[in-house]
Image (cartoon, rainbow, N blue to C red):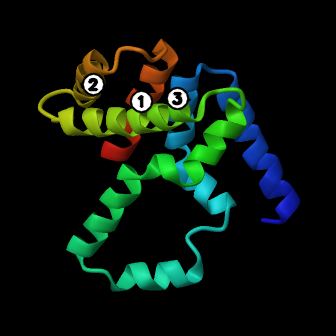
Amino acid sequence: MDTQSAEHELSAIIAGAAKQPLLDAAYALWRQRYRLETIAGRPTAEEVRVNRTLTPEQFSVQYRYARDHAHEGPMFGYVKRAHPRADDDAIRQAIITAVKFEDAYNKHFDCYGDFWDCVVRAVAQAARKYPDYLETTYRDARNDLAYYMK
């Protein structure tokens, strides 16, 4: 992807998030993190090479670290671009909350019975702990959970 089209796609993703309240924007951008990383040229060939040498335990530690520190990395810049007037601490907290919300609905997913009912139940359980999102964000969470758990 050339630099101009990458910046155009990145700008479009951020513009979409900017239309939402801060908390929902942080979640919307968090959901797109893999696409955002690809646009930014990550992982690099060297990072891919190193990742392939990791044991499952090492990969798990690396994965958890990236999630625990998402508010300190590129995600902060993306959310700041979407909400430039937002307080930096509020942005960091919105990212932390987005990651925890995703962790919560993944944790609550238990597929016994109808698949979609299990998805809806898992997001509803997470929503009780994270009640401040728009309904459209819960819809997106259900769709993401269904996609990744299929």
Q: Kindly identify which residue carries mark 2.
A: 126
What number is the disc on residue 119?
Answer: none
Q: Which badge, 2 or 1, is on the more N-terminal residue? A: 2
Judge the density around disc 2: few (<14), some (14-19), many (≥20) Cα neighbours within 10 Å: many
> Is 53 in front, or is 143?
53
Toward the right, the furthest residue is: 4
Q: Quadrant of the C terminus?
A: top left
Residue 47 locus on image (x, y percent)? 50, 78
Asked if marks 2 and 1 touch (Cβ < 8 Å), the reply is: yes
Frontmost of labels 2 and 1 is: 2
The residue wearing badge 1 is 141
Identified by mark 2, the residue type is: Ala
Residue 57 appears in the rendering: yes
Residue 142 falls left or right of residue 57:
right
Q: CA distance from mark 3 to mark 1?
A: 21 Å
Residue at image location 39% in from the left, 32% down from the top: 97
Distance between the alpha carbons at the discs numbered 2 and 3: 21 Å
Q: Is 72 left, or right, of 67 in this rendering?
A: right
Q: Are marks 3 and 1 in contact (CB under 8 Å)?
A: no
The residue carrying mark 3 is 90
- Observer-side mark, 2 or 3, equals 3
Query: What amino acid type is highlighted by mark number 3?
Result: Ala
Amino acid at dot 1: Ala
In this rendering, the answer to whether 56 lies above or below 104 is: below
Q: Residue at x 65, y 30 (%)?
A: 17
Report the side of 88 relative to 6 (left or right): left
* Residues at marks 2 and 3 touching, judged by CB atoms closer than 8 Å: no
Secondary structure under badge 3? helix
